[in-house]
Image: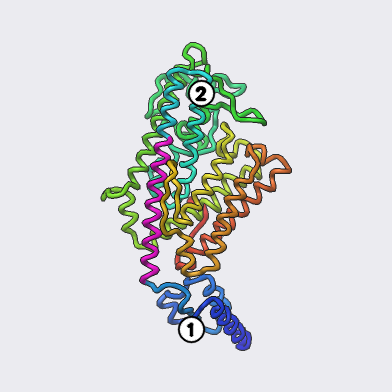
Amino acid sequence: MGDRVADYRFQDAARKLVERGAQRIVVVPLLASRFSGHYDHRSRMMKKMRRGLGGVGILLAAAGCGRGEAELEAMKGDVVATYAEIVHASYEDSFRAVEEMAAAIAVLLAAPSEESLAAARIAWLAAREPYGQTEAYRFYGGPIDAAGGPETLLNAWPLDEGYVDYVEGAPESGIVNDVAAYPKLDRELLVLLNEAGAEENLSVGFHAIEFLLWGQDLFADGPGRRPYTDYVAGVGRNAERRIEYLRIVTELQVEKMEGLVAEWAPNDATNYRTSFLALPRDEAVRRILVGIGVLAKSELAGERMFTAYDNQDQEDEHSCFSDNTHRDIAANALGLMNVLQGHYRRSDGSTISGVGMTALFREVDSELADEVEALATRSLRAVEAIPVPFDQAIVDPDSRPAVLDAVYALMDLGDRIAEGGSALGLTINTALPG
C-alpha cells in the first residue's frame, strides 16, 4: 500500500469517526495494541480501518463513542443477569405447559374419545410455544446440552415413526407392537432405546408424543389422523401397550422440563445459574452469543429449514405429524428476539425486561446494532409469512421463495451476531457443535 493511499484511508476513516460522534481521535502504535489486545476487536469500524491501515502500522481509537471499560463491564453483567431471568421464566412457562399437556393426555388415556384426543393435541401444540423459545439457550454446553443433558430426550428429531408404532403398510412395526422383543414397557427401556442404533430411532420426547397423538401425516391438506380408538383397550391393536407407552414418555417429558427449571432457578448455590453468573463476564456473554448465533444460522436456517427446502421432503420438517413446523420456526425466531432485546412476555401476559444483547452491541458499534435489530425483525416477519402447512410450502413453487427468504434473513442475522461478538473482542462460532 502506498503512503498516499494510506493517508487517504486515514483521513476518510477519521472523517467517518467524527461524523459518528467521536470527540477526538487518538493514534496509537499498532504493535502496542497487539500486545494489549485492547483495540483488536473493539468495533467493526475499527476492524475495517485496521484492514485498511495494517501496512502503515497505526490504529485509530475513537473516544466519546461509547462507555468506559468499567461501565461496559457493568453493562455486560446486566445483560447476563437479564438473560438468566428470561431463561428461568421461559423454562418455567414451558414446564407448566408440559404439565397441562400431561393432564390432558391423562384424560385421553383414562377416557379415550374424539374430544379427549383433540384436547390432548391442543395441549401439545400449546406446550410447543414456550418451549420453542427456549431453544435460544442451547449449543454452548448449558444444562440442556451438556454431557448427559436431556435435550435428546426432550426434542430430538427427525423421528422414524416406524420405530415407535405402526405405519402405513407395516401394522405390526414399532416398539409398541414388538411384544416379543419388549414384553414389558417401562421408563428405563424407552430411555435406553432412544437413539439406539441410529439418530432417527427416537423413542421419547416431544415428537414421540406428537406421533402417538397424530399418527403419520399422509395428507396434503392437514396433519395425521390417528383415531382415538388406538387408545381403546380391546379395540386398538396393542392399545394397552400404547397407553402405557404414552403415559411413560409424557411423565418423562414433565420430569426433564422440571429439571431445567431447577438448573436456572434463582438462589440455589448448587445449580447451573449460579455458576453461569459467576463466570467472567466475557465468557458468559460469549455463551449467550454462541447460543443465538448457532440457532439462527446453522440449526434453524440450516438444519430445520433449508434442509427441508432443499430436499422437499416432509420427513425433514420438525413437527411433521401435527403440521406445526411453522409455529416451531416462529417460536425459535421469537426466542432469538427475546435474547437480543432482553425482553420476554410470559405465558400469563406479564413481562420481564432488562438489558439485551443489542444494547450491548450498540455501545461498541451502533451501526451493527441497528443491523441486528433490523434483521431480527425481518427474520421474525419472514418466518411468520411462510405459508401453512410447511410441508406444502417447501414443495409449492409459489411458496418456496418465502421459505428461502426466511432462511437468508436468519443466516444474515447469525452472521451479524458473530460480528457483534467480534466487536466485543469475542470469537463466536456459529457452526453446529460437532
Q: In the image, 163: left or right of 271?
A: right
Q: Is 163 a magenta residue? A: no
Of the image marks 1 and 2, the number of the one nearer the N terminus: 1
Q: How many marks?
A: 2
Q: Position of residue 154 (x, y in %)?
A: 44, 38
- Identify the residue at horizontal 62%, vertical 42% (top origin): 308
On the picture, is 27 further left or further right than 19?
left
* Residue 163 visible: no
- Give the residue pinned by disc 1: 24
Furthest toward the left, the residue is: 269
Residue 163 is situated, as x and y percent measured from the top left of the image, at: 52, 28
Q: Which residue occupies 49% across, 35% down?
A: 126
The answer to whether the residue labelled 1 contacts the one labelled 2, judged by CB atoms less than 8 Å apart, is no
Task: Please provide the residue range marked out in magenta.
Answer: 70-97
Which residue bears the numbered disc 2? 117
Camera sees residue 66? yes
Helix or strand or loop: what does disc 2 sit on? helix
Q: What's under tag 2, amino acid-wise? A: Leu
Please tell me how crowded label 1 is: few (under 14), some (14-19), or many (20+) other residues with Cα within 10 Å: few
Above or below, 226 relative to 75: above
Image coloring type: rainbow
Tag 1: residue type? Arg
